[in-house]
Image (cartoon, rainbow, N blue to C red):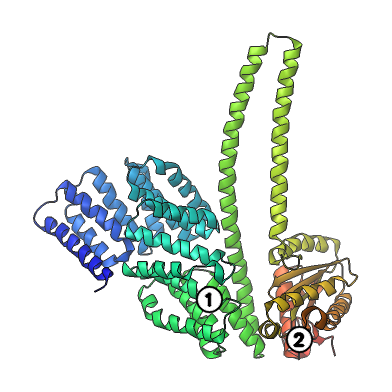
Amino acid sequence: MSLSFYTMIGSKIKLFLVLLFCFSGSFASTNIDQLLWQTEQIGTANPRQFDENLELLNKSLPEFNQAQKDYFDYLRYYKQGYSGEFEKSLQNFTALFERSHSIDIKFRSKVKIANIHVIAGDILASLNALDYVLNTIDLLENTEIKLLGYRIAQTVYFLIEENQLSMSFSNLILENNPSDTNKCSALTNIGVLKLKMATDANTVTESLINDSIEFCESLGDFVFSNLLRLRWLKFQLNLQSATQEDYQQVLSQLNKYKTQIDETEYKNLINIKNSLFAETYRKLNDVENSLKYAHLTISGSKSIGNTAQKLSALEILVAHYKNTGQLDLAFKYLEEKVKADKIYYNQEQAKLIAYQKVKHDNQAKAQQINALNQKNQLLLLKNDLSEKSKRNQLLINLLLLVVVLFFILFAVRIIRQQRKFKQLSELDHMTLIFNRKGIKEHMKILLPYAEKKNETVGYIIFDLDLFKRVNDVYGHVVGDWVIKKSIEVCKEVNNERAVFARLGGEEFSIVIRDSSLEETKRYAEIYRKAISEIKTIDATGYEFHVSASFGITTSSLSDFDYTNLMTHADHALYQSKNNGRNKSTVYQPKSLDRKYFDNTSP
């Protein structure tokens, strides 16, 4: 029999012995403490046993001392949280933190408060709670309680993309002789982070991933084991070197563990699984199953919000209905994707802003304390030298000047770093033009200005035709060259009012300031012809044709609203694709029928 079988039997025997004490009369204090601790260790791994222990403890509640009552309340509020009563659980944990005199209970409560805020998406509140946890952790004597703090730190920092910090706390857990449950959590997080930061297959140790999965499975913790497994399968699916055979192997693994994942009843895990099914079937050209799992992913996202999985599913639906000419459905899911993308993007930005705010607040506190110390030192120095010569007074003034200059230089350096960070975050690193975030920020400034000046803004979206075929046939290196070359030839067109952006993949936008509809159409045709005349043989060694389809609108058609401009230009782009590709189409708001679209290309 396996080691996990004997481990399970051993834990059952321990629990039986504790229960035997319980039913033999009133609890001794040590037995109460033991069962409270054991119940906490069970956690969500065995919800039924957790509830049975709570009922058993409740029968002896009159015999509890105050510390044991607080501990029991902590476990009850924990149950509320994992049962989905987040608001009620949060209120109770906050009240418990205020009234308890035990630093262990206060610490545990703050850990759960941080966790609930993470689930609710309130990253700033979670980071503030985490700040208390990390400032208090060295005051604790019990290592297992400290590990609760390390676990929430690894989780919060993972969610806000502070990968190195998250990895550090996972390693801290492993260095402190953790329980099997904590060890499983840390190994899973390290595995996911390694996959997240990997650049290619050679940078990930497959044995590390498999060993971590097997360890968690031996504990019966199928949430963590399958979370890492799904990340590993997604990593394999998206490798540039992956073949149809590799896709089939991923599908086989998904089918093998599908039931096990569903039985966890963990909604986020199930949604990740459904999304991965949809992506795998898409790569295998199984349209029916790909659409089925895409719809399941969107349905599963209703209770957990706008996730990366939902965006991926919507992208699959948009691409399918666009390619099959079902433009009404394509447009419907595109609108839903634009809204979900906006919310998801804002959530991701909120995480970064929250972390930076807490980080800067802490830096500001440290600087304030440092400044006060320096100020006090200067005052003392001034008093000591008050009766000395003018030469000494000059020294004081020079010292004050040096301190002021130091703070000015420090402030300038911070401002420059922030500007540089902002600039880098708004550029597409491959083409060195705006990315989606950068063009959005640009439009926030341009549109109100143009509206005030009564200037028309031209907006163009273009998409490289059959680009997936280029990647599949000639490889991603050639595909990258095509993307960069397309932007290069467009930028060679003499138009100082044009701004370019890469919206993602092979899709781009062009914004032309103070440009009428006729002028915007004329430039779109110039850009289209420039792309269609690209010569590939000398640079790539392959001879193939490059073309792009264009969708055109202006602020006179779509108003000074960035979402409208994007959506209308994209819909016109679909018409260009539907009418044979390598065309330019103007959006007409009168109707979505094809007859109302002006095809400017022959």
**Circle nearer the viewer, 1 or 2:** 1
The quadrant holding residue 508 is bottom right
Position in image of residue 163 (x %, y %): 54, 58
- Specify the amino acid type for callout 2: Ser
Query: 371 or 55: nearer the eye?
Result: 371
Q: In screen coordinates, is 591 left or right of 201?
A: right
Q: Which residue is mark 1?
A: 236
Please rate how many residues cluster around mark 2, counting C-alpha atoms within 10 Å: few if below 14, some from 14 to 19, many from 20: many
Q: Is any atom of residue 506 visible in this view?
A: no
Give the mark nearest the N terminus, 1 or 2: 1
- Specify the amino acid type for callout 1: Gln
Q: Which mark is residue 576?
A: 2
User: Which quadrant of the rendered structure holds the N terminus?
Assistant: bottom left
- In space, the residues marked 1 and 2 are separated at their CA atoms by 35 Å
Q: Is residue 103 above or below residue 22?
A: above
Query: 78 or 473: nearer the eye?
Result: 473
Q: Residue at x 59, y 66 (%)?
A: 343
Element class at badge 1: helix
Element class at badge 2: helix
